[in-house]
Image: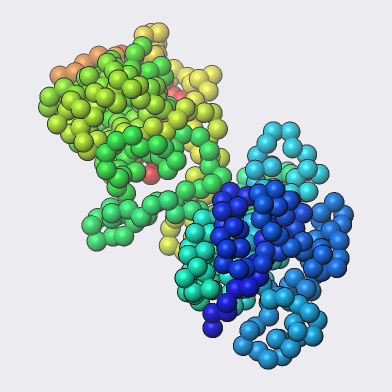
């Protein structure tokens, strides 16, 4: 049953698009009923509105807290048009039917996002009548349409203009969105009250409210469907809210790789660039200018860097763009805080891949990072504190007889910053504040050492080595010494630490224990 719409109830906080919508309803012969602020807004635009208080015979009171909570309102929303007893009841009590309800809620989340907001101010933005109206209309969607967002207006008005009412299919879709709207609203209020109490590192209940941003072409493999969702509570530079300046849409794997590239780049000192392939860095470098850092990062493993994605911790300038346009280089995507106009022009006009490269402007980095990391497993969710931020160097100790020179200390700090983002078992070789060899994802740490040394090749002598976890045996030290490694940094903590220290002393190698592991499983 699709009741024709003669009356509409409108009470909104967000008035975007409302005037045109209400004017269209009136043109269709619909009587608009409204409350204080909304009524004044529409009347100010010359739209005829019937006051809800006049209709109910009961005034708004308590500073607007009480205005729509009345049987003559809810009876008109909840009446079932195919039930004789319901229709007799509304006739008996002189209740108007409201087959269309247009309601959105007080801006609670926008209010609490402002600095200095008191709890009393927040409480006044907790809507009571609004969610009740929305839920009532959604419950009775067999007969009542609920517009809970301005984006609904166009489709609703088009159907009314064509048929005088709305279809059950549309009403059912609107009802689902309305219940999601009120659920998110209540969740925001609940989260706010929880935030006013002493916080728990891991709350007893964890609620996720995610919004689908885009359906992706496919997932890790072509036979897998995929989509990307945003978390409205996450702020700061990220790929989901980034502005895409060029190129086709990002794939599932692009997003994973770019997320890693950004994480690495923001952890690098000075001007830093990371080069990621298959979710591991094949290049990373720091310098006093972003173009030089880019060159050094791409030189880390030129073969692997072909078709890679890049992360920048500084704006991409014309010099960096010119370098990336060098014949023979191929880049899939770049994520950076921003791109200069000259850089965009160069990257989208010079190289062969100019039309396809994705340029993702993520915004300026901030210190605000999500406090928790999550990972889905069968049956539930693993949650842990994030592994961001610099390690306290006061906890670092030189475990060997050989001491670390200031020059090597800076190199070891850089290697340690890179190593924490390589998948375990992770070994990196760095030189001149650039990654020159990485061993990742091996079941044996000595295999990772051998791979990193092989990648470094002739550049190995004089480099420094970082390991994400302790060396269980001294064999890796002997391999590093043969390759000409000048110093090592690792967490320490193995029961064979002394054997590893003795091996370093045998070769005259200095080694730092950081006393903190950065294992990335």
Q: Is residue 361 above or below residue 435?
A: below
Q: Is residue 318 above or below residue 233?
A: above
- 348 or 268, which lies in front? 348
Q: Position of residue 330 (x, y in %)?
A: 18, 32
Q: What colour-coding does the image apply?
A: rainbow
Q: Quadrant of the C terminus?
A: top left
Whether residue 467 is visible: no
Q: Kindly identify the residue that appears in the image at 29 percent across and 22 percent down.
A: 343
- 69 or 479, which lies in front? 69
Q: Position of residue 514 (x, y in %)?
A: 46, 25
State left or right for residue 91 relative to residue 45. Answer: right
- 446 or 108, which lies in front? 108
Q: Exactly how many numbered labels are in the figure?
A: 0
Q: Position of residue 24 (x, y in %)?
A: 56, 60
Q: Is residue 496 above or below residue 109?
A: above
Q: Kindly identify the residue that appears in the image at 21 percent across and 36 percent down.
A: 355
Whether residue 17 is visible: yes
Q: Kindly identify the residue that appears in the image at 35 percent across and 21 percent down.
A: 340
Q: Is residue 311 above or below residue 78?
A: above
Q: Quadrant of residue 504?
A: top left
Q: Quadrant of residue 303?
A: top left
The extreme left residue here reads 328
Q: Quadrant of the N terminus?
A: bottom right
Q: Kindly identify the residue that appears in the image at 47 percent across and 27 percent down.
A: 364
The extreme bottom residue here reads 84
Q: Position of residue 319 (x, y in %)?
A: 27, 16
Q: Quadrant of residue 331?
A: top left
């Amino acid at each position: 049953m699709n009741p024709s719409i003669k009356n509409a109830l409108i009470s909104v906080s967000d008035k975007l698009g409302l005037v045109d919508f209400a004017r269209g309803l009136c043109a269709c012969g619909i009587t608009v009923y409204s409350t204080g602020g909304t009524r004044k807004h529409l009347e100010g635009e010359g739209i005829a509105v019937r006051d809800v208080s006049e209709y109910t015979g009961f005034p708004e009171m308590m500073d607007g807290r009480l205005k729509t909570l009345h049987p003559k309102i809810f009876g008109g929303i909840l009446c079932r048009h195919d039930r004789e007893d319901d229709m007799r009841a509304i006739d008996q009590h002189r209740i108007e039917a409201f087959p269309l309800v247009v309601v959105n809620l007080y801006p609670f989340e926008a209010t609490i996002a402002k600095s200095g907001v008191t709890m009393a101010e927040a409480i006044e933005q907790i809507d009571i009548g609004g969610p009740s109206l929305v839920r009532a209309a959604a419950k009775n969607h067999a007969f009542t349409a609920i517009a809970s967002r301005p984006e609904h207006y166009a489709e609703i008005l088009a159907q009314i203009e064509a048929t005088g009412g709305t279809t059950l299919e549309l009403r059912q879709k609107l009802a689902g969105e309305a219940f999601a709207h009120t659920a998110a609203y209540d969740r925001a209020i609940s989260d706010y009250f929880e935030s006013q109490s002493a916080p728990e590192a891991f709350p007893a209940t964890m609620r996720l409210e995610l919004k689908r941003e885009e359906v992706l072409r496919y997932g890790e493999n072509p036979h897998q469907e995929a989509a990307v969702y945003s978390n409205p509570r996450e702020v700061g530079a990220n790929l989901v809210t980034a502005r895409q300046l060029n190129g086709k849409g990002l794939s599932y794997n692009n997003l994973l790789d770019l997320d890693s590239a950004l994480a690495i780049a923001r952890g690098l000192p000075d001007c830093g660039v990371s080069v990621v392939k298959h979710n591991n860095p094949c290049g990373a470098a720091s310098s006093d200018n972003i173009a030089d850092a880019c060159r050094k990062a791409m030189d880390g493993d030129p073969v692997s860097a072909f078709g890679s994605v890049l992360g920048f911790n500084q704006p991409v300038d014309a010099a960096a763009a010119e370098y990336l346009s060098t014949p023979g280089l191929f880049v899939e995507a770049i994520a950076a805080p921003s791109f200069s106009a000259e850089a965009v022009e160069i990257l989208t006009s010079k190289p062969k891949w100019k039309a396809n490269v994705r340029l993702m402007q993520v915004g300026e980095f901030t210190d605000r990072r999500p406090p928790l990391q999550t990972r889905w497993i069968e049956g539930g969710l693993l949650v842990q504190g994030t592994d961001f931020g610099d390690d306290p160097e006061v906890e670092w100790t030189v475990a060997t007889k050989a001491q670390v020179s200031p020059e090597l200390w800076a190199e070891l700090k850089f290697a340690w910053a890179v190593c924490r983002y390589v998948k375990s078992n992770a070994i990196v070789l760095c030189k001149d504040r650039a990654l020159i060899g990485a061993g990742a994802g091996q079941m044996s740490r000595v295999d990772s050492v051998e791979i990193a040394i092989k990648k470094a090749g002739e550049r190995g002598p004089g480099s420094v080595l970082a390991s994400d976890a302790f060396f269980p045996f001294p064999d890796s030290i002997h391999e590093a010494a043969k390759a000409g490694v000048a110093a090592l940094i690792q967490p320490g903590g193995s029961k064979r630490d002394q054997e590893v220290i003795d091996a370093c002393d045998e070769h005259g190698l200095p080694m730092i224990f950081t006393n903190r592991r950065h294992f990335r499983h």
